[in-house]
């Protein structure tokens, strides 16, 4: 049983919907089950972060460093907003930003 307030429990409580956290370091953060939907995460350093089941619908990832994240899926990235300045993990490097409509 995990103690209340443990890192594992806190990761499930993170809801940054619509927050502006641009140009921040979240290196090695446990973002498991975190909600970043609609957040501005431009130029955020996510290297080493665990993004298991992190919600990224409409999250702005322009210029974000995602090269060494753990558990990031193609589906998560496809729901986010990113461009050629976003550094994706090698296993997702074939993904391309959606064309502007």
Image: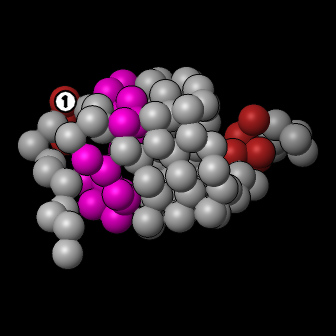
**65 within the magenta span:** yes
Which residue occupies the extreme left position in the image? 94
Mark 1 sits on what residue?
90
**Vertical relation: 77 (above or below) 6:** below
* Label 1: few (<14), some (14–19) or many (≥20) C-alpha neighbours in 10 Å: few
- Left or right of 96: which side holds 89? right
Residue at 15 percent across and 64 percent down: it is 99
**Residue at 30% across / 38% down in the picture?**
86
Residue 33 in view in this figure: no
The residue furthest bottom is 101
Q: Which residues are magenta?
A: 63-83
Residue drawn 46% across the image and 58% down it: 59
User: Which quarter shows the C terminus?
Assistant: bottom left
Residue found at the far front of this picture: 101
Q: Is residue 32 above or below residue 80?
A: above
**Front residue (pair 91, 82):** 82
Q: Main secondary structure of the magenta part?
A: loop
Answer with left or right where residue 97 lies relative to residue 1: left
**Residue lying at the far right of the rendered structure:** 4
Residue 29 image point, x, y percent? 60, 31
Is residue 15 or residue 40 the one in the foreground? 40
Q: Is residue 45 magenta?
A: no
Q: Position of residue 57 (x, y in %)?
A: 44, 66
> Which quarter of the figure is the N terminus placed in?
top right
Residue 13 position by quadrant: bottom right
Q: Nearer the viewer, residue 86 or 2?
A: 86
The quarter of the picture where residue 17 lies is: bottom right
Q: How many marks?
A: 1
Res 42 visible:
yes
Q: Residue 51 location in percent, x, y? A: 48, 43
Classify 8 as above or below 77. above
Q: Residue at x 59, y 26 (%)?
A: 25
């Amino acid at each position: 049983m995990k103690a209340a307030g443990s890192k594992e429990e806190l990761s499930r409580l993170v809801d940054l919907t619509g927050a502006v956290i641009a140009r921040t370091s979240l290196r090695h953060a446990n973002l498991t089950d975190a909600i970043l939907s609609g957040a501005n995460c431009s130029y955020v350093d996510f290297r080493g972060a665990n993004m298991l089941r992190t919600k990224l619908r409409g999250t702005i990832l322009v210029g974000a460093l995602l090269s060494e994240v753990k558990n990031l899926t193609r589906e998560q990235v496809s729901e986010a907003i990113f461009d050629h300045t976003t550094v994706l993990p090698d296993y997702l490097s074939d993904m391309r930003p959606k064309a502007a409509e």
